[in-house]
Image: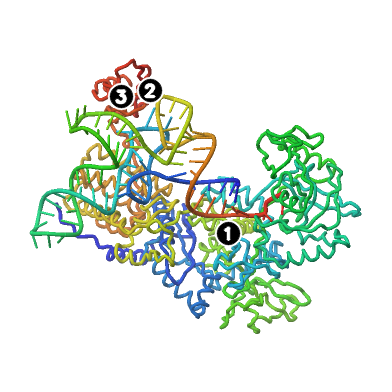
Amino acid sequence: MIESPTYSPSEVEAKWRARWQEQGTNQPDLDRAERPFYNLMMFPYPSAEGLHVGNLFAFTGADCYGRYKRMTGYQVFEPIGFDAFGIHSENYAIKVEKHPADLIPQNIANFTRQLTRMGGMFPWRNVLSTTDPSYYKWTQWVFLQLYKRGLAYKKHGAVNWCPSCKTVLSNEQVIAGACERCGTAVEQRALEQWYFRITDYAGRLLANLDDRTKMDWSDTTVMAQKNWIGRSEGAEITFRVAQGGTDAISVYTTRPDTLFGATFMVLAPEHPLVARLTTAGQRAAVDAYRAQAAAQDLVSRKVGDKEKTGVFTGSFAVNPATGTEIPVWIADYVLMEYGTGAIMAVPGHDERDFAFATTYALPIVRVVAGPNDDATTLLAEAYTDVDTDGRMVNSARFDGTTPLETKAAITRWLEAEGHGKGTVQYRLYDWCISRQRYWGPPIPIIYCDSCGAVPVPEDQLPVELPPLENFRPDDSGISPLARDEEWYHVPCPECGGPGRRETDVSDTFLDSAWYFLRYPSTDFSDRAFDPERTRRWLPVASYIGGNEHAVLHLLYSRFITMVLHDAGLLDFEEPFLKFRAHGLIVKDGAKMSKSRGNVVIPDQYIDQWGADTFRMYLMFLGPFQEGGDFRDAGISGPRRFLDKVWDLVTLAGHPDARDGEIRHDVLVKWHQTRKKVAEELEGLRYNTAIAALMELVNTLRECNCAEPGVIRTLVQMTAPFAPHFAEECWERLGGSSGSIFDSAWPGYDPALTIEDTVVIAVQVNGKTRGTVTVPREAEESVVRKAAEADPAIARHLAGEIRKVIWVKGRMMSFVVGG
RNA sequence: GCUCGGGUGGCGAAAUGGCAGACGCAGGGGACUUAAAAUCCCCAGGGGGAGACCCCAUCCGGGUUCGAGUCCCGGCCCGAGCACCA
């Protein structure tokens, strides 16, 4: 035995970090790569706490994939950057009474150190930060592209307001009625905001989700987006107002089949027709109700189990199917934002309408009968089933048909008679991008008394964020930027007259909605993204990130990409060909949180074990796409594995070591491992890839095999997980000069992945009673003879053998009668 | 309520419908050592049996099948997303 010097992670890792830096190992040639592979991971927000173990888990997983792809012959571009604008940074700065512009560079420096230390294959020449004017210049440019296309507009309306963060929140940032960031209950406020017309793209955003050629994504993410876009099919139906001249109320319903059961109508309190429909006698009650609804915050307005309230307008409308006059009410359970802001109420078959009708003693008519009732059975609750064997009743000529058939038939009838048409509705709302905050890119608009809202000319970008000393938000609803008089007053770009800058900054999600376009072009200061570079590298080949961004960041990125595509600036409309959501790491079975005090600080572990061991442990502790449980005790396993590999490398690297005969079973194990590890890496199943490597090492140790050819491939297969370690081993093996990541991934011989002998499980009446070992190609008769010769099996074969099931190379099953 | 995941030893987890528990952690026993650590070897789902072996076991209840952790039906529990969306 050869004495092996122990493996020292800190020395090895420092050595290779330096060498990669010196030799530009991680920097692909962006202009000449012939097999480019854009390997993207979600860039972090550079917090003061430093990299979280969750970040590291995600980045390591993405990095393993990138390193593997590189070894299979791709030029891999695996950039990293910093999502440093936003309320996170700003609130933290306020808390510690510092300026975000001072804090962010410190945090970025710390993150850079940690990211370098973890051994990510990052091309630092292309690093970016969203707070850098050379970046947000182009964020503003993106805004202008949307503005030019009529997709950015200003709207006065009710918005979600967080009284603690003192800012407007998008619907996406309101979680269960509370601010996503601080948990404070959200209120309603009326403000003028900038919006992006993402709703114009709802249909395409939804349709592409099913197009595997454009996007191969995690199912969970696709589902979340579908949910969010919320497509529903139904009909728009017009109800003429009785004695109302030409007035008509248009409603949207997903249940046109229940039209005969519509016994009243409900308008949102904000509906524009309300004033005209309200009769003199009802005016006072209606006005009071509307005032009350307006004061209510947007969120509690949408709490579903609240008691239904409403007021009669005094007017009636005509049900086009029955000709009956039905009362028109207003109620806050109808929302102005969805559909037409008005509904036909079918209390018999809608839970909310049923509750409302019960409260106000409005008529309830059954138009669908379930299997156990008929037209006259009273409804104790709304009957909402569509798919079961219900039949139409009280619906004239539609009686007896199913709701589904009737839905189509009534829609056809509505269209023929001019009462309405089949339509599709989406639940998606337009994206409010205005933030009355400081720490973001100013929205590039100038207001002029004579010209109105004027976009800042592109050659005057960026509109730099002024270095305000007091950047704290206040209650006014006006951005802190308005306090800088010199910045605020600016000549109008059109007429040269006095103008004022837009003082809102844009949503952080706009910064991150296009950053992947910027990475390959960070060295161009005169364009957001270079067409040539973009053509070579995009769309992104693989994107890995957290599913918490399933509907926000990922949907916005798709939208912005689609808009730029429509503007002729990109030749693809989906930015991420493949997206995989990684799982979450918990600690000792519990969610990590500061309050629990169980947050894993990666630095400590890397100090103790080295980055390679830590990476390997993270990839081994559970399936990458599901996450896993971090337990300190588990780290020693991967470390012991690396030590064993080190020993084998030491043996194989010895001057006396020679390539030689390899025992056949070891040869088979070797090729099986080569096949398995490649497949598992491709599928991001790192835990089982590592298990396969451990098995190989166990086999090699058992039979004292350290054949240099075998060990070289072992090191190559370990390289994606433990890059510094693998480089060092590679150098010691003297295989070739240069990085192991420029060596070719070991293929395998399919013929050698199959063993010569196989173990056949033998079952009798469904129970495994033994095994027989036979040559791989053994036929049924041979196996049967062997099985019957085995006493342990034979004793169960006493009765008449009625049937034998034979699966070649796998198992034999006897069915014995008795 | 709707839509997705998921439920397997002491723990993290593996298993194209074909020997359940690979791989690893923790544990027990042994070797080496004055001793400990490290390392190496052996054992290890539960129960029964002196033993060859036998029975039970993948959340629960049914079903399909020669054979089910895996497929189907019904239920329970956990996690995530959406939710007065007509």
Residue placed most toward the observer, A316 or B20 = A316
Q: If you read the primary sequence from the N terminus, does the residue marked by circle 1 or circle 2 appear first?
A: 1
Q: How is the structure coloured here? A: rainbow
SS of the residue under disc 1: loop
Discs 1, 2: same chain? yes
A504 horizontally vs A706: left or right: right
Q: Do callouts 2 and 3 mark residues in contact (Cβ within 8 Å)?
A: no
The answer to whether residue A336 of the structure is visible from this angle is no
Q: Position of residue A518 (x, y in %)?
A: 54, 63
Q: Which residue is mark 1?
A: A552
Q: Which residue is mark 2?
A: A805
Q: Position of residue B61 (x, y in %)?
A: 46, 34
Residue A778's tag is 3
Q: Is residue A601 above or below residue A540?
A: below
Discs 3, 1: same chain? yes
Residue type at tag 3: Ala
* Dot 3 alpha-carbon crowd within 10 angstroms: few under 14, some 14 to 19, many 20 or more: some
Residue that appears at 91% across and 54% down: A245
Q: If you read the primary sequence from the N terminus, does the residue marked by circle 3 or circle 1 appear first?
A: 1
